[in-house]
Image (cartoon, rainbow, N blue to C red):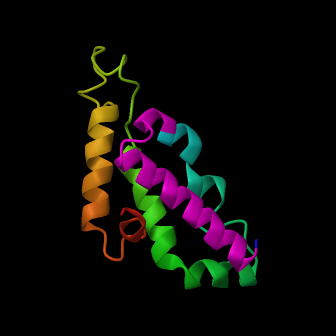
Amino acid sequence: MTESELLSWFDIHDRLLVSCLGGDISVEQFVEHYDNFPQSFALDGHESDDAGKALLERHRDRVRFHFGVVECLRGLCRADEIDKSGIRKAGGFGPAEAFVRLQKYCETWPKNPTTAKRT
C-alpha cells in the first residue's frame, strides 16, 4: 500500500466516524462499513515488509486512533440482544452506549483526526 492509499483509507474511515457521530448514519451502519478497519487492513504491521512498517510508524497516531475506535466497540451487541440474560453482565452493551463511548473517545483523543472534519 502506498502512503497516499493509506492516507485515503484513513480519511474514508474518519469520515465514517464523523457521519456516525453527526447522526448521519447509525452505529450499526458505521460498524458495518467500518468493518474493523485496523484489523482488516493489518495496520498492526503483521503483513508488512520493512517499508510498510516504516509507513505505519510514520502514521502511528492515526493507526493508534483507529485501534482505539475498535476498542470502544468491543462488547457491542445488537439492540435487540442487549436485554437478554447475561449479555449486559458479561460487559455487553448496545448501540446507544457505543455511540457515547465513541463520542467520549473522540473528545479525549489528542490530535483527533475527526475534529477538523466535523464542521
Residue drawn at x 31%, y 69% as measured from the top left: 109
Residue 59 percent location from the top left of the image: 55, 79
- Within the image, what quadrant is residue 112 found in? bottom left
Residue drawn at x 43%, y 70% as measured from the top left: 113
Asked if residue 99 is positioned above or below residue 57 in the image, the reply reads above
Instruction: Please indicate whether residue 1 sits to the left or right of residue 58 in the image.
Output: right
- Within the image, what quadrant is residue 87 found in? top left
Residue drawn at x 64%, y 67% as measured from the top left: 8
* Residue furthest out toward the front: 119
Instruction: Please indicate whether residue 34 sits to the left or right of residue 26 in the image.
Output: right
Instruction: Please indicate whether residue 101 sits to the left or right of residue 60 in the image.
Output: left
Residue nearer the viewer, 74 or 69: 69
Instruction: Please indicate whether residue 21 sits to the left or right of residue 40 in the image.
Output: left
Instruction: State whether residue 43 appears in this view.
Output: no
Number of numbered discs: 0
Residue 17 percent location from the top left of the image: 44, 53
Task: Give the prevailing secondary structure in the magenta stretch.
Answer: helix
Residue nearer the viewer, 38 or 95: 95
Quadrant location of the C terminus?
bottom left
Magenta residues, start to end: 2-29
Check residue 33 for magenta coloring.
no
Residue drawn at x 38%, y 35% as measured from the top left: 76
Residue 48 percent location from the top left of the image: 73, 72
Check residue 17 for magenta coloring.
yes
Quadrant location of the N terminus?
bottom right
- Within the image, what quadrant is residue 52 found in? bottom right
Residue 19 percent location from the top left of the image: 44, 49
